[in-house]
Amino acid sequence: EPVSPTALAASPDGNILYVACATANKVLFFDTTHRTVLKSIPMPDMPMGLTLSSNGTRLFVACAAPVSRVCEVDTAKGVIVRTIQAGHTAMAPVLAPDEKVLYVCNRFNHDISVIDPGLGKEMRRIPVQREPFAQAITPDGKFLLVANHLPSGRADTNFVSSLVSVASSSLTLTAPVTLSTISSTICSLLPGRSTSAASFRRVTAAAHTTAS
């Protein structure tokens, strides 16, 4: 059976690897020591992203559909305990460092769901450039960086660039970061680096120079 792994998350002790399987519509619990599948959890739609609470007890699975759902999984019991509605083609969920907010990319709504995981409810949306595909949050929680998969304008001009949208902790957008002539699919942060908006622009300038 084809499973099409799309996302991974590891338990805090490293003993369990959670694998989102897109075409199989399931999440696998994989024992890294014995290299066996312990559990297979059916999902309501295609799982396109995972994020795990710091204590390893809650796994949030973004299940992509025209009306997507984020499934909250009790990892000890291996069952879905709650579903939270999101937007069109939800993917790449990210928990804030204090775990009081869950951010989810809604690819074809061109926005980010801001979810209260305690209430299990979407609180608001953050509009971004076009097709948010991946995201990362700074360790201090001050900035959320969102990789937009495609540029917002025409694709047949001399220079076409995707943007990384930058949202502050107040959930307002700051100046975006312009990438080179590429589509962005991965968003990650290096440990120990500055998390000011200016530093994001400097890193992007370096990436632009390298890719040009």
Image (cartoon, rainbow, N blue to C red):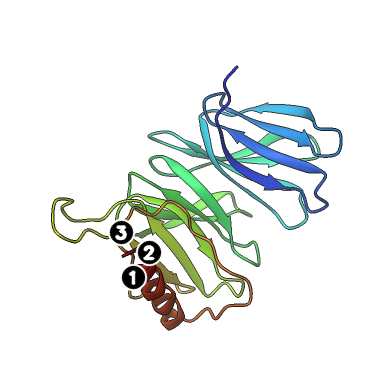
Indicate which disc, 1 or 3, sits on the residue closer to the N terminus: 3
Residue type (three-letter) at the residue carrying disc 3: Ser
Residue at which label 1 appears:
176
Residue type (three-letter) at the residue carrying disc 2: Val
Q: Residue at x 55, y 29 (%)?
A: 4
Seen from this angle, which residue lies furthest top?
1
Asked which secondary structure carries label 3, the reply is: loop
Asked which secondary structure carries label 1, the reply is: loop
Q: Which mark is residue 155?
A: none
Asked which secondary structure carries label 2, the reply is: strand
Residues at marks 1 and 3 touching, judged by CB atoms closer than 8 Å: no
- Distance from Cα at disc 1 to Cα at disc 3: 10 Å
Q: Position of residue 179 (x, y in %)?
A: 33, 65
Residue type (three-letter) at the residue carrying disc 1: Pro
Q: Residue at x 72, y 48 (%)?
A: 10
Residues at marks 3 and 2 touching, judged by CB atoms closer than 8 Å: yes
Residues at marks 2 and 1 touching, judged by CB atoms closer than 8 Å: yes
* Quadrant assignment for the C terminus: bottom left
Q: Position of residue 204 (x, y in %)?
A: 39, 72
Judged left or right of residue 162, residue 103 is right
Q: Position of residue 185 (x, y in %)?
A: 43, 51
Residue at which label 2 appears:
164
| Relative to 24, residue 107 above or below | below
| Relative to 62, residue 162 above or below | below
Q: Residue at x 38, y 34 (%)?
A: 66
Q: Which mark is residue 162?
A: 3
Q: Dot 3, crowdedness within 10 Å: few (<14), some or many (≥20)?
A: many
Judged left or right of residue 22, residue 88 is left
- Distance from Cα at disc 2 to Cα at disc 1: 6 Å
Q: Dot 1, crowdedness within 10 Å: few (<14), some or many (≥20)?
A: some
170 and 159: which is toward the camera = 159
- Distance from Cα at disc 3 to Cα at disc 2: 7 Å
